[in-house]
Amino acid sequence: MQKDKLPEVGTTIFTVMTSLAQQHNAINLSQGFPDFPCDKALKKAVQKRIEKDYNQYAPMAGVEILRKRIQKICQEHYGVHYDWEKEITITVGATEGLFCAIAAVVHPNDEVILFEPAYDSYAPVVKLFGGKIVPIALYPPDFQIPWETLKEKISSKTKLIILNTPHNPIAKVWTQEEIEQLWQLIKGRNIFVISDEVYEYIAFVPFFSVRQHSQLRERSFIVGSFGKSLHVTGWKVGYVLAPEPLTTLLRKIHQFTPFCVSTPLQYGIADYLTTHPDFYQKTLQLYERKRKLFLNLLKETRFEPLNCQGTYFMLLRYGHISTMDDVAFSQYLTKEVGVAVIPISVFYSGNYSDNIIRICFAKQDEVLIAAAKRLATL
Ligand code: PMP
Ligand code: GLN
């Protein structure tokens, strides 16, 4: 029998809860994906490229016009320069970018610091490459960074720190001061950073990207996803920005994982970004409106929302509605109330439970209204 490389890994909570939602015909506020269509012009742009026979392998690092577009957006939106040839790589969603970035720097017995709750795709990859997870737990209601603990946990073995801003599932946005504080702790050490910024355009408070920190960015991989910014999670087109030496390491792995990313999707996205340079304002306005709508709807329920600074997720406290733990309560909500949600304890490696669930508000207004009605029955 072959030894399992990831014995503690089962099926992701997103797959589990979406299947349960389908089985029980529940409104699915669990897995994070929009249930509304993307812009028609984006679909047309891709169709056009398919029709024009852009259907063979793309360049390994990504098509030139898409990388140049990302370079331009970085310059205009963040005021920073990343060279399209040497520092920008298109990946199969953020997930592949994260995989390659972790694989590029983690060697056996290296320590990798994760802030928990942590998105579920980081830890298995670290383990696959022999790294050891050093979790730093963040707790509600504010999920403050415990700086003293972080300082203690950084050691000569620390190779990588993974952060996520805006953060899934806690909806926290790191401040410029926090990014600077992180830099103060790691400067002078051989530590790399992965900043998962897939929700970069869904921030309801000022967003400071790690790419804007002139020193930290020299050690960092910044990971993005068009799935979130353009409402096409199923297309799986993402990107990684990193200084040339790190990009070289990343591409060595990327070239043997997918080699390259879907050609017509890359061209279509690039064309769309050219004709719709205001895409990120639209994305933000849309989710700002949906967040407000859902917050208003929640007033008719006994659920208590926690502060949502970014992402299309919101945490809800239910402690005065039920004493069930969050896994049991999420199943109960899905099966008995008809609303599927995600328990947040699964994003902690320890036995953490605080009667909090995560919902996704990237749903049509009428779906959010119907879900809130069901939640109001509790
Ligand atoms: N990171 C975070 C924090 C996410 O929420 C997601 C979402 N699905 C991903 C990475 C993966 O993004 P993609 O679908 O582009 O692979
Ligand atoms: N990122 C999405 C979420 O948090 C799910 C992605 C997935 O299904 N793997 O819900």
Image: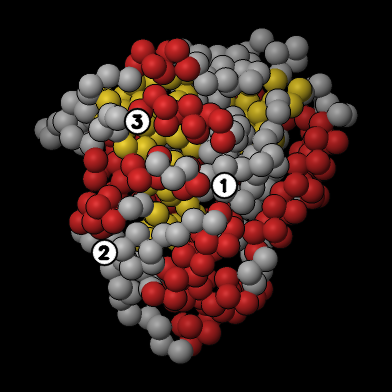
Q: Residue at x 64, y 72 (%)?
A: 276
Residues at marks 3 and 1, CA–CA distance in whole angstroms = 26 Å
| Quadrant of image for the C terminus | top right
Q: Alpha-carbon neighbours of circle 2 within 10 Å: few (<14), some, or many (≥20)?
A: some
Amino acid under label 1? Tyr
For the question of whether residue 26 can be seen, the reply is no
Which residue occupies the extreme right position in the image? 300
Crowd band around label 1 with a 10 angstrom C-alpha radius: few (<14), some (14–19), many (20+):
many
In-front residue for pair 111/7: 111
Residue 225 coordinates in the image, percent (x, y): 49, 54
- What distance separates the C-alpha of mark 1 from that of mark 2? 25 Å
> Viewed as shown, does residue 91 lie left or right of 17?
left
State yes or no: discs 3 and 2 in contact (Cβ < 8 Å): no
Classify residue 297 as left or right of residue 48.
right
Q: CA distance from mark 3 to mark 2?
A: 34 Å
Q: Which residue is under mark 1?
A: 199
* Three-letter code, disc 3: Lys
Q: Which residue is mark 2?
A: 259
**Residue pictured at 52% horizontal, 21% vertical:** 145
Report the residue marked by disc 3: 187
Residue 37 location, quadrant = bottom right
Q: Residues within 10 Å of mark 3 (few under 14, many from 20)?
A: few
Image: 246 above or below 15? below
